[in-house]
Image (spheres, helix red, strand yellow):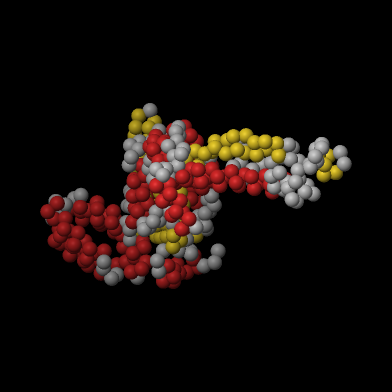
Amino acid sequence: MSRLAEELVESARGHGVQLTGNEGLLTALTQKVLQSALEAEMADHLGRNRYERTGDPAGQAGQGGPEMDRPGRAVNVRNGSYPKRVRTEVGEVTVQVPRDREGSFEPAIVAKRQKRLSGFDEAVISLYAKGMTTGDIANHLAEVYDTEISRGLVSRVTDAVTADLQSWKTRPLERVYPVVLIDAIHLKIREGTVGNRPVYVAVGINLDGFRDVLGMWIGPTGGEGAKQWMNMLSDLRNRGVADVCIVCCDGLKGLPDAIRTTWPDAEVQTCVVHLIRNSLRYTQRRDWKQVAADLKVVYTSPTPEAAVVEFDAFEERWGIKYPALIRLWRNSWEEFVPFLDYQPEVRKLIYTTNGIESLNARFRAAVRRRGSFPDVDAAMKVLFLTIYQREKNRPNPTGRINNWTTILNELTVAYGDRLGPN
């Protein structure tokens, strides 16, 4: 097969034939394959090949009136064909769809009222998930496949995921998640005027060690807020999440209280990366390197008690110059120290929301070219597609955590029956 393909491509090049487009080699081959498949489907439907009659396996046409399969009833036969244009991944092709006299033929390869093959829709959705606008996609397909595609058609194709999105947003979740990561990004969405809207994202790690995006919620203009987090967490609980052992978040004021209200036994872990990032806001640029190095000694301490000693030393060195920095850490201390009770494998998993930050980076890449979205539904559609868009040689938002067996053993010792069989 590979050899035949090479010969066809070389022959096409030798004769100046393009691979794609209306007159392209791949387009012609696709048309031939579809036409042959339709003829085979009709032959299977009728129980005989073209020009072959019942009781005439040699394919000899009989003489006289219509052929009968029983007295008084004519055998169903072919009844011509009609042309149909179909959009495919390699361009637009025209096939002759065969008809039968009874009108009972239902082709599968190109179904009735189907104007696009599934591969075409998948290609459009893939481009949409990568951040291309409907206009970009229409122009791209016109250039590559030499066929005109309207922006309206692209929009209708992408609208096909709306039902999947609604089902995904309300799907039941597991009863217990050992770890949940929570964060937010901001998108520009038009509502009369363009405004920044927060998108809250929650990623859970289940008892089998697999990551799953539990949900996304778009809040009102004005940034993240504890009230919005409360609504979001209530939605997770209503969908079946009865208990979470550790929730890692970015230290938003009021969020720890919202988490404990939703899951009273949950342990709140402030994202250390966010904490360090916020710390540098209170320091002069020339001190960033040294302050970061001194803080590393604190958050890499072997125990919570050792961290207290190291932070006291840090305060002694920097407290007079940067009192707001010290106050930030003192106020966050209760949610900062929980991860220090664990071994390195668990620490690496829960000390930061980077697991969700990588997803946010994919979100930003997908929306960068758009500038703003016309409405909330358009934004959610792109984000939803981005979650399940697989990219080679890059970590995907779903998948199993490395060294999960070791992590689960330690978490089970710490949380006991809460992680037992449900």
Task: Look at the image and tell me whether residue 224 can be seen.
Answer: no
What percent of the width, then of the height, locates residue 400? 44, 62
133 sits to left or right of 58:
left
Say whether residue 302 is left or right of residue 242: left
Q: Position of residue 417 (x, y in %)?
A: 50, 68
Q: Is residue 252 visible?
A: yes
The residue nearer to you, when weighing 420 against 140, is: 140
Residue in the image at 73% along x and 48% along y: 59
Q: Residue at x 31, y 63 (%)?
A: 337
Between 54 and 142, the one nearer to me in the picture: 54
* Of 154 and 200, the residue lying toward us: 154
On screen, residue 48 above or below 269: above
Residue extending farthest to the top is 192
Q: How many discs appear?
A: 0
Q: Quadrant of residue 382?
A: top left
Q: Please state the horizontal and vertical placement of residue 362, each as a whole percent of the image.
A: 36, 49
* In the foreground, 64 or 419: 64
Q: Is residue 115 above or below residue 254?
A: above
Query: Horizontal and vertical percent for residue 146?
Result: 42, 37
**Which quadrant is home to the C terminus?**
bottom right
**Residue 59, above or below 299:** above
Q: Residue furthest right?
A: 71
User: Which residue is drawn at the image coordinates 22% and 63% (left, top)?
Assistant: 296
Q: Residue at x 28, y 71 (%)?
A: 302
